[in-house]
Image: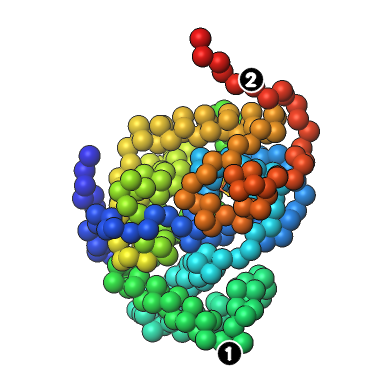
Amino acid sequence: METSPAAPTAAPQAATAAPPPAEAATPADAANPADAPSPVAPAAAPPRSLSPSRAADFMRCPLLYRFRVIDRLPEKPSAAATRGTLVHAVLERLFDVPAAERTAPRARDLLPGQWERLRESRPEVMELFADDPDGTRLARWLEEAEGLVERWFTLEDPTRLEPVEREFTVETELESGLRLRGIIDRVDVAPTGEVRIVDYKTGKAPRPQYAEEALFQMKFYALVVWRLKRVLPRRLQLVYLGSGDVVTYDPVPADLQRVERRLLALWEAITLATATGEWRPRRGRLCDWCDHQDRCPEFGGTPPPYPLPVTLPTPAPRTAE
Ligand code: SF4
């Protein structure tokens, strides 16, 4: 596979970086902060489509998927995920200003306004600072967000980028009927027509054993764009603001076909679990951040009654022959 394709836009990029010793993906690096679980609880409903975040939930823990997608249980805002949302908003809005003015100071200036907008649209984020009467923690948190925004300028040069899409909502239906949807942070298109899909992560680049998980999300987006626009994205690019790394991958059709097969198998498993009401907990590193420990059997809790009709009996466990 080629490792140095033509850059889809004029901006020079940092070389593909070997992930340093770092924390694996955290909730700050949900596929897209806009796709984060809801802080309010709409009515329970069966799943109708798959996004990278929810696909990752099911792969990590089917019971977590149920709580988020079927029960739609509210979750508390997290400082890391909220900071991710704020930083994403600043990076997105910076492209509204003329190219020459897209500097770090200008980006910093956008931060207070975007923070205000976020507070207005999601007042619950202020719960994060409820016990911070003198505002010290909030000030430090905003400084950290500022640091992440500034680091971006060491990784990409927005004065030389003209994205064709930002916070791009994509949705497509596969031949099987499975609907895929997602929100892509940025899409660049080179004069040659080559497409680059870019995703910002406010966490650190993952250790090698977790790198495939982050790439899975990018391949998911690439598959949706490929099916939707009939164009195979030339490059997938993850920009890790937490550690200052840029990780790239150039997909080939076989990669995306593999992802499609994997998603179909995943959807089959989700459909079966929906019909049987059998959602197993899977304990793992994300339990530390899970809002649902008190209702999770792995932690001595009991899930709420299943809110959907059960239409299939639970499959009998296999016995050894
Ligand atoms: S606590 Fe862990 S095992 Fe339980 S639902 Fe959450 S992620 Fe799954």
**Which circle marks residue 168 in the picture?**
none
Q: Percent position (x, y) of residue 175?
A: 55, 29
In the picture, the quarter occupied by the N terminus is: top left
Q: CA distance from mark 2 to mark 1?
A: 58 Å
Res. 107 image quadrant: bottom left
Q: State the residue at coordinates (39%, 77%).
A: 147
Q: Percent position (x, y) of residue 164?
A: 44, 59
Badge 2: residue crowd in 10 Å (few <14, some 14–19, many ≥20) = few
| Residue 3 shows in the view | yes
Q: Percent position (x, y) of residue 56?
A: 50, 45
What amino acid is found at the position of numbered circle 1 in the picture? Asp
Q: State the residue at coordinates (70%, 30%).
A: 275
Q: State the residue at coordinates (21%, 47%).
A: 3
Name, please, the residue furthest toward the top: 321
Label 1, secondary structure: give it. Answer: loop
**Which circle marks residue 316 in the picture?**
2
Name, please, the residue furthest toward the bottom: 134
